[in-house]
Image (cartoon, rainbow, N blue to C red):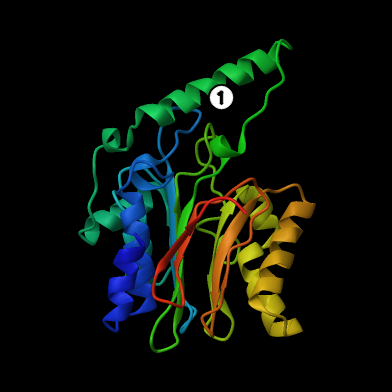
Amino acid sequence: ALRAGQEILQTGGSSLDAVQATVRVLEDDPHFNAGRGSVFTSAGRNEMDAAIMDGKTLRAGAVANVEHVRNPIVLARAVMEKSKHVMIAGSGAEEFAKRNGIELVDAKYFFTQRRWDALQKIKAKEKAGADGTKKFIISEAERHGTVGAVARDSQGNLAAATSTGGTDNKLPGRVGDSPVIGAGTYAKNATCAVSCTGDGEFFIRAAVAHQVSALMELRGISLGEAAEQALGEAEKLGGTGGLIAVDKDGNVALPFNTSGMYRGYLGENGKFVFEIYK
């Protein structure tokens, strides 16, 4: 995934193209909770969300609750560039995809056994908790898993992209922070580009992605400080998760308040850096 973005940036491509290409690779990999590997709703269906934002123009595109779009991030880009809207959801988004030649697939494409098993595990926990025989607990691994990318190109333009299947056992129609501009995804050339993962409801309430940018712009603090403070606002509300961010100077911030967060970036020496734990 990183290589897909790197190749675009090294050949003079745009940050928008780079983040889209990176996220698209992750959507096609069943190991991640986005696209093909998306988790199931309580009704046993896959409903996916995605967003992309251009830091140069502040244009953005997002989709929510799509069930047959192979690559939701591609559709989000189309919403940004081929419509006057920022977000389109559900059947309307899929109709828009058809009209614009974006690939649709059968729902069975998104079925993965481990995600199905995870749903059954959670439902069993719910049932046990309901009759008082066992405390109902969902682990971090069962709740998180969104994918995202941020980039700065040779022209200094920033971009952010995020894609997710949401949370295991979510109610049908639930929308998290990922496609909400300013909550889970944000980019502005003057400050930074941000993509979040975690408890979406809390990230929406704290407007985490925009908060990082606002703190940098209004308080004049560094990306690292702003990212930690913004994440802290979600944590105060009870939210867990993390974010990835890059600023106008190419500095990177990757804070999280969970036991770990899968993350990777292209280091100053031109080599990829991959990390999970702190």
Observer-nearest residue: 225 or 112? 225
In the drawing, does residue 129 fall left or right of residue 169? right
Which quadrant: the N terminus? bottom left
Is 43 situated above or below 22? above
Q: How far from the left and from the top, in percent, is residue 201?
A: 65, 49
Which quadrant: the C terminus? bottom right
> How many callouts does the rendering have?
1
The furthest residue to the left: 101
Residue 35 appears in the picture as rendered: yes
**Residue 232 appears in which quarter of the rendering?**
bottom right
The furthest residue to the right: 236
Q: How far from the left and from the top, in percent, is residue 142?
A: 55, 35
Q: How far from the left and from the top, in percent, is residue 14?
A: 34, 79
Q: Residue at x 36, y 53 (%)?
A: 26
- Indicate the amino acid at tag 1: Ile
Is 88 situated above or below 176? below
Is 62 situated above or below 64? below
Which residue carries the number 1 mark? 122
How crowded pointer 1 is (Cα within 10 Å; few <14, some 14-19, many 20+) is rated as some
Observer-nearest residue: 231 or 177? 231
In the drawing, does residue 136 fall left or right of residue 87? right
Q: Residue at x 33, y 69 (%)?
A: 5
In the drawing, does residue 62 fall left or right of residue 72? right
Q: Residue at x 71, y 76 (%)?
A: 215
Residue 161 appears in the picture as rendered: no
The furthest residue to the bottom: 155
**Residue 102 appears in which quarter of the rendering?**
bottom left
Q: How far from the left and from the top, in percent, is residue 205?
A: 70, 56
Q: Residue at x 63, y 47 (%)?
A: 199
- Is label 1 in a helix, a strand or a loop? helix
